[in-house]
Amino acid sequence: MSTTAVISPKATYTTKLPSIPPLESGDRLTRQEFERRYQAMPRINKAELIEGVVIMPSPVHFSSHSQPHSHIITWLGVYCAATPGVSLGDNATVRLDADNEVQPDALLRLAEKGIINSRIFPGLWLASGALLQEDLLGCVITF
């Protein structure tokens, strides 16, 4: 005599997947964890990782940011148009190293075979060299 166990077709088993913690200003994260959390929060349009610390800037104002930003973009656009091998970017995510991933207001990129090596990956710019950035400390910084 044999016995057969039948599991009811109505029985369901669910496994709760761990939720991804929200990205919050001041968090200390690796670049990989920062990217995982950032991608899980599509409503956030700007967050940066600086020396392993998450920075989420407040909204920008017209006279103190937006208007000067447009002047800088115009200036860089003219420079880019007149300089072969230079590309202009606006608000692109830039991986600088393992602890730094920023989203500068403006950047100039030299051609891949230029003096500075950089590569474009899907959705990201991996930079290992010069970067013109205006938004970290409210001034223009050259790396």
Image (spheres, rainbow, N blue to C red):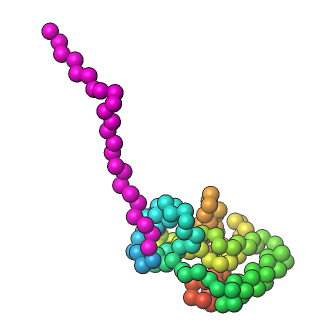
Residue at (34, 27) in percent of width and height? 9
Residue visible at 71% across and 88% down?
68
Please state, as top left, top right, bottom left or bottom right, where the C terminus lies in the image. Answer: bottom right
Q: In the image shown, does 48 or 100 lie closer to the viewer?
A: 48
Which one is in front, 8 or 55?
8
Work out whether 16 lies above or below 143: above
**Image spot of residue 51 (x, y percent):** 46, 78
* Residue 12 at least partly seen: yes
Taking 110 as reference, is 48 left or right?
left
Q: As rendered, which of 95 and 21 lies closer to the eye? A: 21
Q: Main secondary structure of the magenta part?
A: loop
**Residue projecting furthest to the top:** 1
* Image quadrant assignment for residue 6: top left
- Residue 66 is situated, as x and y percent measured from the top left of the image, at 69, 84
Q: Is residue 82 above or below residue 6?
A: below
Q: Quadrant of residue 127?
A: bottom right
The span shown in magenta is: 1-24
Is any part of residue 35 visible from this angle? no
Q: Quadrant of residue 62?
A: bottom right
Marker count (numbered):
0
